[in-house]
Image (tube, helix red, strand yellow):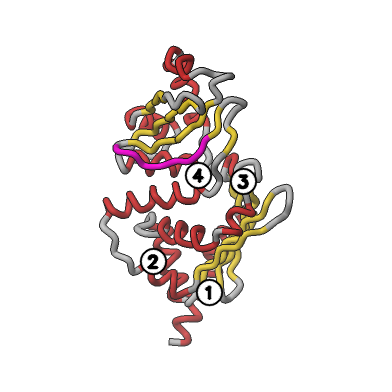
Amino acid sequence: MIVMTGCQEAKLKTVIGIANKQCPLDMGEVGNITSIIYDGDNVVYTLNMNEEITNIKILKDNPESMKSSIKMMFQNPAADVKEMLKLMAKCNSGLHMIFVGNKSGEQAVCELTAEELKEVINTNADPAQSGQTKLEAQLKMANLQFPMQASEEVVVEKIEIIGESVVYICSVDEELCPISQIEENAAEVKEGIVSTLASQTDPATQIFIKTCVENNKNITYRYIGKDSGKQYDVVIPVSDLKKMLIKNKISS
């Protein structure tokens, strides 16, 4: 048993060493993975995060939300990720993810013990339920960062699943942009959103779009007037989301 464990640890060190040589790994606007190491007890990811997008203090203040979201993301993972997790489990390795602010240097650390990883690996979730769980995990992490000023007139308050859509709830300053103006220019607004999403080829955005497609969810921007309460939905259907994945060579 000791010999076998030693062989597995050597294999894990090799796998992690190969991954580390590929760093920094670009995550687009979100930031990048600066290193991946195995210290003998844990696989440690260090991520340099764009603080204009990610509030490190919020992550730091919500450790359990961060942990539960990451655990949900690992349910029914891709084959290569699953193999790495199994190898980590055989080595009784935990997982540490260190999020570092690119300007402040502030850190938020998420730690999963070896037992917690094994629990995730042994969770036999139904694929459909797992897909919904992954989407909910992504939204839970995203909502830690909201509200966020998207433009002078629009604040994204939160994201939630409503019916057949993942909905961005957007509060609009009607003195700067009446809801009627968004409605009158709906085609242009949609075109702008599609163009922005299609241009974001970073892994985080692509995984989010792919998860929406797998769950057959549209992406909807719900603009709500701060004073009037009037609202208008701009819907990006699944068919448009699929084209973004084809364009960026990520199949659904």
Instruction: Find out whether residue 88 is within the magenta segment.
Output: no
Tell me the element at label 4: helix
Question: Which sits in the foreground, 26 or 10?
Answer: 26
Magenta stretch: includes residue 160:
yes
Query: What is the spatial separation of the Cα atoms under label 3 and label 1, in whole angstroms?
Result: 30 Å
Judged by depth in the image, the label closer to the viewer, 1 or 2, is 2
SS of the residue at dot 1? helix
- Residue 34, percent from left and from top: 64, 54
The amino acid type found where label 3 is placed reads Gly
Under mark 1, the amino acid is Ala
Q: Earlier in the sequence, mark 4 or mark 2?
A: 2
The image quarter containing residue 239 is: top left
Percent x, y for residue 138? 44, 49
Question: Looking at the image, which residue is at 45% across and 35% down?
Answer: 169
Magenta segment = 156-163
Q: Which residue is mark 4?
A: 204
Dot 1 or dot 2: first in sequence order is 1
The mark closer to the camera, 3 or 1, is: 3
Q: Position of residue 123 (x, y in %)?
A: 32, 66
- From this view, report whether residue 227 is shown above or below residue 18: above
Q: Is residue 165 left or right of residue 108?
A: left
- Mark 4: few/some/many CA within 10 Å (<14, 14-19, 20+): some
Distance CA(mark 3)–CA(mark 4): 10 Å
Tell which tag, 4 or 1, sits nearer the viewer.
Answer: 4
How far apart marks 4 and 2 lie (CA) works out to: 21 Å
- Residue placed under numbered mark 1 in the picture: 10
State if disc 1 and disc 3 touch (CB < 8 Å): no
Does label 3 or label 2 sit earlier along the sequence? Answer: 3
What residue is disc 2 on? 120
Q: Amino acid at mark 4?
A: Ala
